[in-house]
């Protein structure tokens, strides 16, 4: 028997523990504040996929969690009816993502929609009579092909022209706004759809685009627009409420039930900036009036909620509208129905939202402000250093206060009858649901989903590090020490670098880090300048300077841990994904101190990558203050592939063939350039998984990726010794 209190009797973390972990997400509090619905997800080894169900647990911790739905597919996005007696949720049990409704007391779920391409997100009307939802709609090619099929005797699917394939799992992407993504399926779904394929899905047809933005990683080509629909909660035919060459997101019913609000950019040049506007539409007995724009077309909006009085909104937003994603601090604002705006957190230099990296979570949930029961306090999560915590600010303005703190990442939260309910992860604990009083006190766990597996594992505890740079800037980092670490002994070390670049490492479980530590490595992970959570000036420090001050910060951490006597400097490696892959390649082009490197989903050539990612053109035009054609010398100077002649460190490249953020040709360029020079380079090319393969790819591919990384470092650093 394993003694959970005695780490010497526990075993080391293994790759296939990935299949044993359970992931919880999206806690939703019932209208009476007494029950929490949440999603529990598992990775299935034999099916090589993901399955998810809806669970319930008392919000005060007085009872055990129990499973409400029992599908072998994906049940997700649970939303309570206003009366609290039913839950609507999105499920793939019929194939496409559709709305289902189940009584909380039990019984069989009933399917509410059979919309042609599935549902993106949903929300109940306050009277419980209607459910609003989003779905993609047919483009002109779809309509033409359907008409041709009908003329040949084919059938039109139920749901008319509405359409959505919804391939992402609630959005955990590190470089995008999670608030605006649908709670969709995983990209690597089994081909088990019961829905009949549409005519436009069969055969090959040319795709024609005139927009700037034509693709999204994890979803593919952006061929169709997402629009607003409404359906009677008791059943009936959905009605499409919006149409046009724009997308609808973040739908919200007003508390009085008289209006629907949503976020959209209806500017003809919408693709050229990061503006979103709030629109409102009057609703009377399911009939929609004319929509009206509320905001002044001058904000990047990341999340909205109606004010309890139905006369405006609380929003997360910023005004640097040409910035692509994440580099700017999202603050809390209020907006009246007349468009008057007021910032509530101007002096709080931390970004709203959950921007800490993890490779073991299912979703950070919707990003939106929440209110106290009396409507006078706004609660919001924010990234604060390497942690994500809950804060509050009075609706009428005032001091931002700490509410739920701790060195962890709060993924999402809700307001219960007697406190706050939230899902969270730490560096040693993957995730669970917790509750705390409104002042953060009396915290306790409501779930313990990974008790069995964690009870067996010798999970490494992080040691926090602070390094001060010559200009006085203080940098935060952490070390994981190998299980059984002996003081005075020097160990091989792997420097891990996060993506973004404007995200962070910190209080979140990383399976890859724990595996490297279990193989006998010290794992060093840090937040160099450019990271989120330390203020706007800190994040802006790398503008026009990728590979400059951030490289110096990373090397300062390496020097620091060597000086402390922890590390064998003859056995050091470096690894990272996305921007971390860029920096790993950059580092080995500028120093020979590392014995092995892994660059996953990297950018090797900023000039060529600018135009082939889903939004990289906008990101880098902001980061380097111009296009590669305008600033050719800078783009090439800051491209790792420029320095291949100086690269002698053995390099492993991992990349998914369908990555639409940093195209696989970026790995191809680096691989070919090094192979021509007969350097030690290895390419591992995955058939699918996209940019988020390490978090949401097929489980078998996630396992293979980890195997290659561990073997590479074992081979070149003798970590096992």
Image (cartoon, rainbow, N blue to C red):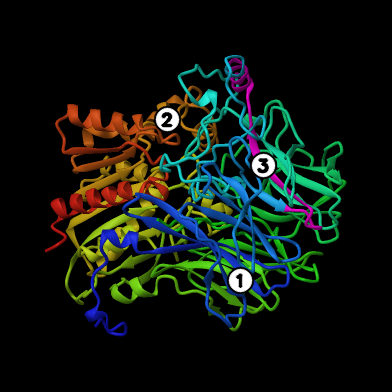
Q: Position of residue 424 (x, y in %)?
A: 51, 67
Q: Position of residue 92 (x, y in %)?
A: 52, 47
Q: Secondary structure at mark 3?
A: strand
The residues colored magenta run 124-148
Crowd class of label 1 (few under 14; some 14 to 19; many from 20; radius 10 Å): many
Does 721 lie within the magenta span? no
Residue 609's disc is 2
Residue 134's disc is 3
Q: Is residue 30 left or right of residue 609?
A: right
Front residue of 279/495: it is: 279
Write the residue at 38% across / 56% down: 43
Does 139 lie within the magenta span? yes
Q: Secondary structure at mark 1?
A: strand
Front residue of 92/300: it is: 92
Residue 575's disc is none
Crowd class of label 3 (few under 14; some 14 to 19; many from 20; radius 10 Å): many
The CA distance from mark 1 to mark 3 is 27 Å
Write the residue at 64% across / 66% down: 104
């Amino acid at each position: 028997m394993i003694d959970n209190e005695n780490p010497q009797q526990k075993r080391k973390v293994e790759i296939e523990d990935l299949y044993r972990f359970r992931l919880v997400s999206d806690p939703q509090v019932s209208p009476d504040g007494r029950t929490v619905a949440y999603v529990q997800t598992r990775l299935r080894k034999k099916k090589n996929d993901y399955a998810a169900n809806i669970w319930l647990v008392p919000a005060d911790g007085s009872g055990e969690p129990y499973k409400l739905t029992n599908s072998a597919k994906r049940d997700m996005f649970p939303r309570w009816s206003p009366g609290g007696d039913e839950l609507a949720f999105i499920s793939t049990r019929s194939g496409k993502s559709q709305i289902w409704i189940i009584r909380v007391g039990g019984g069989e779920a009933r399917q509410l929609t059979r919309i042609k391409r599935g549902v993106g997100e949903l929300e109940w009307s306050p009277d419980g009579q209607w459910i609003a939802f989003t779905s993609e709609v047919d483009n002109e090619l779809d309509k033409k092909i359907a008409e041709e099929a009908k003329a040949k005797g084919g059938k039109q699917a139920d749901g008319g022209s509405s359409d959505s394939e919804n391939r992402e799992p609630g959005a955990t992407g590190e470089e995008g706004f999670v608030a605006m993504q649908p709670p969709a399926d995983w990209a690597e779904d089994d081909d088990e759809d019961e829905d009949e394929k549409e005519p436009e899905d069969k055969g090959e047809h040319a795709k024609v685009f005139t927009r700037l933005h034509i693709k999204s990683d994890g979803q593919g080509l952006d061929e169709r627009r997402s629009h607003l629909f409404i359906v009677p909660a008791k059943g009936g035919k959905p009605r499409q409420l919006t149409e046009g060459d724009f997308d609808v997101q973040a739908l919200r019913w007003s508390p009085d039930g008289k209006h629907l609000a949503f976020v959209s950019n209806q500017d003809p040049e919408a693709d050229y900036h990061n503006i979103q506007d709030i629109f409102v539409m009057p609703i009377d007995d399911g009939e929609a009036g004319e929509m009206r724009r509320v905001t002044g077309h001058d904000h990047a909006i990341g999340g909205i909620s109606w004010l309890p009085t139905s006369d405006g909104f609380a929003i997360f937003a910023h005004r640097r509208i040409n910035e692509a994603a994440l580099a700017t601090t999202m603050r809390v604002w209020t907006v009246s129905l007349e468009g008057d705006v007021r910032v509530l957190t101007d002096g709080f230099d931390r970004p709203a939202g959950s921007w800490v990296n993890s490779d073991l979570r299912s979703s950070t949930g919707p990003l939106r402000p929440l209110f106290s029961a009396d409507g006078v306090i706004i609660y919001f999560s924010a990234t604060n250093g390497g942690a994500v915590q809950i804060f509050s600010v009075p609706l009428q303005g005032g001091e931002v206060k700490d509410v739920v703190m701790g060195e962890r990442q709060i993924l999402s939260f809700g307001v219960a009858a007697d406190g706050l309910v939230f899902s969270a992860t730490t560096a040693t604990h993957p995730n669970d649901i917790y509750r705390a009083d409104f002042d953060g006190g009396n915290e306790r766990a409501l779930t313990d989903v990974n008790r069995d597996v964690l009870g067996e594992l010798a999970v490494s505890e992080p040691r926090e590090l602070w390094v001060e740079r010559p200009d006085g800037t203080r940098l935060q980092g952490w070390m994981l020490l190998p299980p059984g670490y002996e003081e005075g002994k020097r160990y091989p070390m792997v420097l891990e670098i996060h993506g973004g670049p404007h995200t962070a490492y910190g209080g979140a479980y990383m399976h890859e880090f724990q595996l490297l530590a279990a193989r006998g490595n010290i794992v060093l992970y840090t937040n160099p300048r450019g990271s989120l959570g330390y203020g706007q000036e800190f994040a802006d420090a790398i503008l026009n300077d990728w590979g400059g001050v951030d490289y110096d910060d990373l090397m300062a951490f390496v020097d620091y841990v060597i000086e402390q006597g922890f590390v064998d400097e003859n056995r050091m490696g470096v690894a990272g994904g996305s921007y971390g892959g860029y920096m790993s390649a950059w580092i080995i082009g500028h120093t020979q101190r590392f014995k092995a490197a892994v660059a996953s989903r990297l950018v090797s050539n900023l000039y060529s990558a600018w135009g082939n990612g889903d939004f990289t053109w906008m990101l880098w035009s902001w980061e380097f203050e111009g296009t590669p054609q305008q600033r050719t010398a800078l783009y090439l100077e800051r491209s790792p592939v420029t320095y291949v002649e100086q690269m002698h460190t053995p390099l492993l490249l991992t990349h998914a063939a369908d990555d639409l953020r940093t195209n696989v040709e970026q790995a191809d360029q680096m691989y070919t350039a090094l192979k021509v020079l007969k350097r030690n380079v290895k390419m591992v090319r995955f058939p699918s998984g996209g940019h988020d393969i390490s978090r949401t790819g097929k489980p078998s591919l996630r396992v293979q990726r980890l195997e290659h990384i561990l073997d590479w470092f074992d081979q070149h650093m003798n970590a096992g010794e």
